[in-house]
Amino acid sequence: MSPLEIARSFSGGRILGRDGRPLVAKRALLTRKSLLLFTPDQVLKLRRPRLIDGYDQEALSTRVGMTSRDRWYLRRMNRGVELGACELRFDESSGRFALVEPSADAEPSDDGEPVLWMRRLPDELRADTRLASGAPQETLHAALEHAMQRLARLHGEAEVHVHPPFGEPTRARARFEAALTRIADRLDPSDRDRLARQTGEWLDELADTLAHRVYERRVRTVHGELRAEHVFLPGPGLRDVVFIDPHDGHDAERALDTAEEVMSFALDLELLIGPERTARVIDVYAGETYDGTLRKVDRFYKRLACLRRVAEALDDGAEPGADQAEVAERVRFFVARALRA
């Protein structure tokens, strides 16, 4: 059951909903990890059967596990968005796919593809769309402040890590070195050396601060991939902030210093609303969480976010049919942004 076959069946009206009627297809979107199928009021998320970030989604058991984790996060962070547990099964007699909602005590079937079944949120309320729409600044500022307050609550309720391997003061350095090594052969040697030398000096200066952040309980299980595209802001049809698509791979990418998550989001905000307004929004989070050292580590974690975006661009470039010119431009942009951090 390939993503292409499923997408074609969806577009051709050959996927039946739980009511037995064909789903109305609006669009299909293939991401690095998933296939997303959009109807007017629903979204179906299916895992792509491929190797992603070191974990093997080719195995059905992995796709079942990842979908279950998706479901758990969605229920924890955004009540009312998930619509239920479903499998997509192919009926050979009719040549159609059908969504099946198994009973609560049923084991996943061997011939069913796990599906995360969600309510479709208004596209115009996605943070990156809304911030680029020219809406009144006061409205946007209030919405972003609310998002920061919600993020602070989520972090405050999250699991704390004060012991190795995640609660390790030197972990920030290890994450930076891993990110730089991953893209080193695509960097100009002078840029690579500057990034390594300058960041090493920053981390030497931050050693005590990073250790303090661990023992201040700032390392927690977080969203892990927070971007403006993952945040829906309150508006018509949506009462509260919604965070979608949390990282669902290795625990190492979800157990982070909360500053790493905040500054990844801040990187997007700076591009959308500028550094001054972004700083005011981030100050709301710092105030909600009593985070007195967030500003001390912000430039390091923004640089780390840039290097990770470079790696993602290179991964996208390895996809069949990828626009190599667009990939190269993303790499240049985020390398330059990292050097300015």
Image (tube, helix red, strand yellow):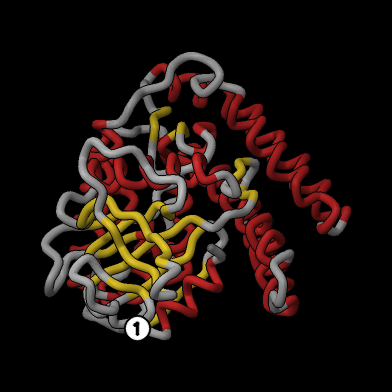
* Above or below 73: residue 7: below
Q: Amino acid at mark 1?
A: Lys
Q: Nearer the viewer, residue 139 or 249?
A: 249
Residue 218, percent from left and from top? 39, 28
Q: Residue furthest right?
A: 189
- The residue at which mark 1 appears reads as 26
Image quarter in which the C terminus is found:
bottom right
| Residue 194, above or below 273 | above
Q: Where does residue 84 sit, x and y in percent of width and height?
A: 22, 53
Of the pair 282 and 308, the residue shown nearer to us: 308
Please state which of residues 324 and 38 is positioned toward the viewer in this rendering: 38
SS category of the residue bearing label 1: loop
For disc 1, the neighbor class at 10 Å (few under 14, some 14 to 19, many from 20) is: some
**Residue at the spot x=83%, y=46% of the render?**
193
Relative side of 291 to 267, left or right: left
Task: Where is residue 100? Give x, y as percent.
Answer: 28, 58
Question: Residue 16 is drawn in which quadrant?
Answer: bottom left
